[in-house]
Image (tube, rainbow, N blue to C red):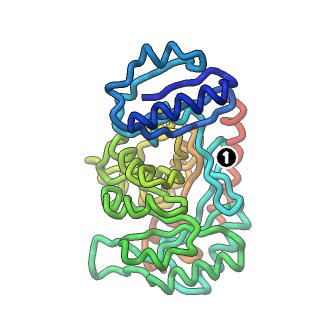
Amino acid sequence: MIVILKENPNKTQVDSLMAWLESKGIEIHTSVGEHQTVLGLVGDTSKLDMDLLLALDIVEDVKRIQEPYKNANRKFHPDDTVIDVGGVKIGGGNLTLIAGPCSVENEEQIIAVAQAVKASGAQILRGGAFKPRTSPYSFQGLHGEGIRLLKLAREVTGLPIVTELMDASHLPLFEDVDIIQVGARNMQNFELLKLLGHIDKPILLKRGLANTYEELLMSAEYIMAGGNQKVILCERGIRTFETYTRNTLDVSAVPVLKKLSHLPVIIDPSHSAGKWELVDPLSCAAVAAGADGLIIEVHNDPAHALCDGPQSLKPAVFDALAQKLRAIHEVVSAQK
C-alpha cells in the first residue's frame, strides 16, 4: 500500500500518522519528491482502513500495490533513482558509458584499454576478474590478481571499476570495488542477493537468460529488502530460438522496466549480440529507447583476447560509437 501526502503536509500530523502505522507493525519507506511525498507501507496492510486514511487532512490518495516487488516499484518511489559512483551519476536522464575488456588479462592490457575508453568518454571501467564460463576448460579469469589490476587501472585513470562477483566467499576481495556485478547465472542466487542487501555498495544486476521482468525486479527486491537501495538493472539479452546471435536483445526491457521501476536501466549489447559489428546498432537502439547507460566490451587486441574477442570493439570503433551515442542521447533528451 502507498499513502500519497498532500503538498507541504503538516509535519506534526505526518509524524503522528507514521507513529500510528508503525504501532500496527507496518514498515514505512518514505520517498520525498519535488511535488509530493509518498509513504510506502510494507507489512500486513490488509487491516488498514483506506477510508480512514483518506479522511486525514494531509492525505491526497491511498493505493494498494498488487505487485510483489515493493521497494523496486515506481509506485513506491515515483522519481527516478540516481546512483552516484565516485561522482558519476547513473540514472535520472544521464547517459553512463561503461567500457572495458571482458576479462582482465595483464597489466599492460587493462591499463591500455582503460586509458583508451576514458579518452573516448567512458565514465566507468569494466573488466572481469572472475569469469563464469560454460566450459570448465576455458579461461576462468585472474581472480584476486585481476581485481588488483583493475584497481591499478583506476589509480592511473581515475575511472571507477565494476567487476562480477560469483560467490559469497569472494566478497572480501570486493571491498574496494566501486560497483559489484551480479551476472545472469546468479540473478536468482537468493542467498547471494540477500548478502549484497547488507552492504553499502552499488549492485549491477543482470537479467537471467530466460527470466521475466517481474523475476528480475524480484531479484532486485531481495537486495533492496536488506537495506541496499543502490541497484542498477541490466538487460543483457535473453535466450530465444534464434541462433545467429549469441542472445536476443530485448530492447522493450528499457521502457517496460522504467515504467515498472524507478531503478536505472542499462543495456549490455556485447553479450546480447556476440558479434562486434552488431554492438553499434544495438547500442543506438538502446539509447533511443531511453536506456540510462551501456556496458560495452572493448579490447585492444580482440583477435587474441582470452575471452569473448568476437564481441569486443577495438578502441577506435568504440570512440566513434561513443560520439554517436552522445548525439542520439541529446536528441532523445530534448524530446522529453
Q: Nearer the viewer, residue 190 or 286?
A: 190
SS state under label 1: loop
Counting from the top left corner in percent of width and height, residue 127 is at 52, 72
Q: Is 102 on the left or on the right of 123, as rendered?
A: left
Where residue 41 sits, quadrant-wise, is top left
Question: In percent of the image, x 47 and y 28: which residue is there?
Answer: 2
23 shown above or below 10: below
Residue 236 visible: no
Quadrant assignment for the C terminus: top right
Q: Is 159 on the left or on the right of 184, as rendered?
A: right
33 shown above or below 286: above
Quadrant assignment for the N terminus: top left
Residue 181 visible: yes
Counting from the top left corner in percent of width and height, residue 25 is at 39, 38
Question: In percent of the image, x 41 and y 18: which residue is there?
Answer: 50
Q: Nearer the viewer, residue 138 or 30?
A: 30
- For label 1, the crowd category at 10 Å Cα-Cα, with few meaning under 14, some 14 to 19 and many 20 or more, is some
Counting from the top left corner in percent of width and height, residue 86 is at 68, 63
Q: Amino acid at mark 1?
A: Asn
Question: In percent of the image, x 71 and y 72: which residue is there?
Answer: 158
Q: Nearer the viewer, residue 155 or 199?
A: 199
Question: What residue is pinned by disc 1?
Answer: 94
Where residue 125 sits, quadrant-wise, is bottom right
Q: Is 220 on the left or on the right of 210, as rendered?
A: right
Counting from the top left corner in percent of width and height, residue 39 is at 52, 32
Q: Is 220 on the left or on the right of 105, as rendered?
A: left
Question: In percent of the image, x 54 and y 62: which residue is there?
Answer: 200
318 shown above or below 71: below
